Amino acid sequence: MKLLWAVSALLLSCLRANASTDPNIITYPEEVSNQTSAVLSCNLTEPSFHIKGSHWTHNGKIIEGSKSDVATPYIVHRLDRITYTSSGKYECVFLTDPEVKKTIEVKTLPHVVAYKHSEHGNEKDKGVLVCLSSGYPLPTDWTWFKDGGQTPIINGTTDKYEIKSTPNKTTLVIENLSIEEDIGDYVCSGTNELGTTSDRIHLRVRSRLAALWPFLGIVAEVIILVTIIFIYEKRRKPDEITDGAAPLKTNSNANHKDKNVRQRNSN
Amino acid sequence: MTNNKPKVEGRSDEAEGPDGGWGWVLVGALFVSTSLVFGLMRSLGIFFVEFVQYFEESAQAISWISSTGLAAQQFFSPLGAALCNAYDARVVVMTGGVLAGLGLILASQATCLVHLYLTMGLISGLGWGLIFTPMVATVMAHFTRRRTLVLGLGFSSIGLSSFAFNPLFQLLVEMYAWRGALLILGGLSLNIVACGALIHPQRHSKAPAKVDSASRSSCASVLNRVSSYLELSLLLERPYITYTLAVTLLNVGYFVPYFHLVAHSRQAGFSEYQAAFVMSAAGVTDIFGRVVSGWFSDLRHFRLIHLLTMWTTLAGVFIMLLPVSSLSGSYTALIGISLLYGFCSGALTSLVFAVVPKIVGVERMMGGLGLLQLIESGAGLLGTPMSGLLKDITGNYIASFMVAGSFVILSTLTMATLPHYFSCTDPLPLQRRSLDDKDEGLHSELKLMNSVSSDKNHKGVNDLTDEVTKYPQDCVG
């Protein structure tokens, strides 16, 4: 019996010794999900090493205001308003030798925003709708809906729609735009483990001939102008031959007719 | 009899430009056509965003479109000049307008990037080359006393139209998509045809009449004619070569601030809006600089070449000061130097072309301008990549600006080596050297001087030469 006690005590102390060779950081909370504010804290238990200081990093970049030289094993970082910009991976770093750190993930709903809220395309041409996302974690799934309908647009079922998605960007390409069918609102939805957010894009399809009318108008204006200029010149021609311009060519003033005719300076 | 002093202004090229009347109509035409050529070229950036998204190409591939357009415009300038010499300036400009419009109209139907290079780049560029040099030469021929002023007025359209075109193009792209917008731009470019129609048709071709005396369309005589249309003989003459070299050096450094100033300001720590505002401010003073320098040059207090040298030196100095002002962190200094730089660079633009007839004479001005554009185009293509390379090597823009400024100063020094630079009067323009028409050329020049002076009665040609040399122009007035 005593032997059993001794062995178990030895085992326990060995375990405890093993545990104490790696300093343990207790984080609270372990993970932040969908909260509006939080206080991240790290507690370095069993500080067998000398703490020279500490700081926090956000997505790998050191947070300037969090650097500290105080040798305390308990540090906090406040997040007063959690938005998609403040989401990501936070690490508390203790400047021991070697450094120890632990990560706390701050997760929010994805931030989905359309690249352009109003897109346009030409009839029979292709239309490109783009949605971007930022925040943490990035969406794992993207879906597109037309006009707020319930049936999503599936990639590959028809030639008309093609969806290309990466975690931070999704593109919907609509081939062969038609004015009757394709005008309207399109909704892009990004889903991550916390939920879904979406944004909407309004697609306008211009008829191929829409620009033709202003174009024809301008061409008509040019033709009218040129005609007026030519007519004006024909009517002027019998009256006066020379315009007295300095010749880019030789002999273009009236002197070629009569060498002795003097020409007054028109100034 | 009574007034023997000829009204000719110095022993220079001043053939009689009537300086008024229809000339002003042509200035308006120059204004419109220049804005539709260069103003349009500068505002094509709006389309590039659309192209990058639609064709899914890199920004660099897209930017080749405008480089091709600009290069084509400058490359085909001598062609435009030669065609004007051979045929009619009016026909050439109208054809250029049609080509420019056609290029844009075809571009609206493009399905791949190569189409855009060929249409917007090559065809429109060819059209622009046929428009710009002939229009400038025609306007310069119509004016003597106010030549630089009208050039300044005409070129101020570039700055004004880039202001107006940027939001306009954005609106067109929003409403009609880039295809429709290009189509409408093609239509707008057709207005250049109307501008060209305003030029009076020429009654005499510049074809040297000596060809008939040769009366054989042999290879040699055709080459002779072609080279005389292109004014290739200018390439053998030292003043022209010197001047072209100077302008080429100027072009190496001239464009660098336009490309790199915004990036440099951002790097120095200013915000996006502050950096963009610096460019806009420089653009505004650019417009003022063109007009004011044109007006001031025509007051005739100084020789044009001296004024050009002064503006060029100042521009070079300010380019070199630009990095200093932004590094010191003072936004006011940056704005101030940029304003001054904008003013000087606009001022020298008006003069660069106006000096050409002083050197080569009004007759050969057309070809001279064309060749000048061609040769200076190489410099523009060289300058910006070089400054980009310097930035990549050194990590900031200081070296680029310094080198650019030094090229501009170098061009000033080159200009100082022009013959008769330090004299107070403009020297006689170059005479065409070909043996055939040497006498004809001289004869006609003197006939022009004959016609300018008021009361000469049956004076012989030889008497006139004596008259002219007796009254040299003095420095003032």
Image (cartoon, rainbow, N blue to C red):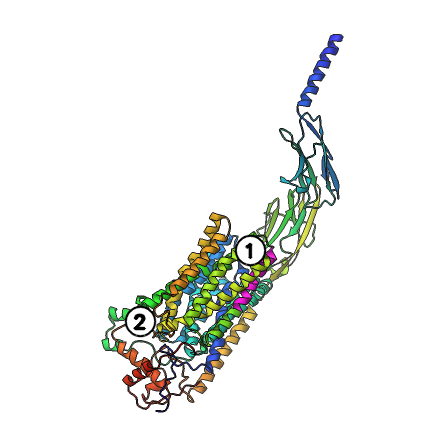
Query: Comparing marks 2 and 1, which lies closer to the viewer?
Result: 1
Question: Which residue does the image show at 31% across and 71% down from the upper left?
Answer: B228
Front position in the image: A238 or A192: A238
Magenta range: B271-287
Disc on res. B326: 1
Left or right for B394, reference A65? left
Protein chain holding label 1: B
Front position in the image: B296 or A164: B296
- Residue under label 2: B228
| Element type where label 1 sits in the image | helix
Image quadrant where one finds the N terminus of chain B: bottom left
| Magenta-colored stretch includes residue B272 | yes
First-in-chain label (2 vs 1): 2
Question: Which residue does the image show at 70% across and 20% down from the upper left?
Answer: A16
| Element type where label 2 sits in the image | helix
Most common SS among magenta residues? helix
Is B312 situated above or below A116?
A: below
- Across and down, in percent, residue B80 comes to 39, 70
Indicate the amino acid at tag 1: Ser
Front position in the image: A71 or B221: A71
Image quadrant where one finds the C terminus of chain B: bottom left
Q: Is residue B288 visible?
A: yes
Indicate the amino acid at tag 2: Ser
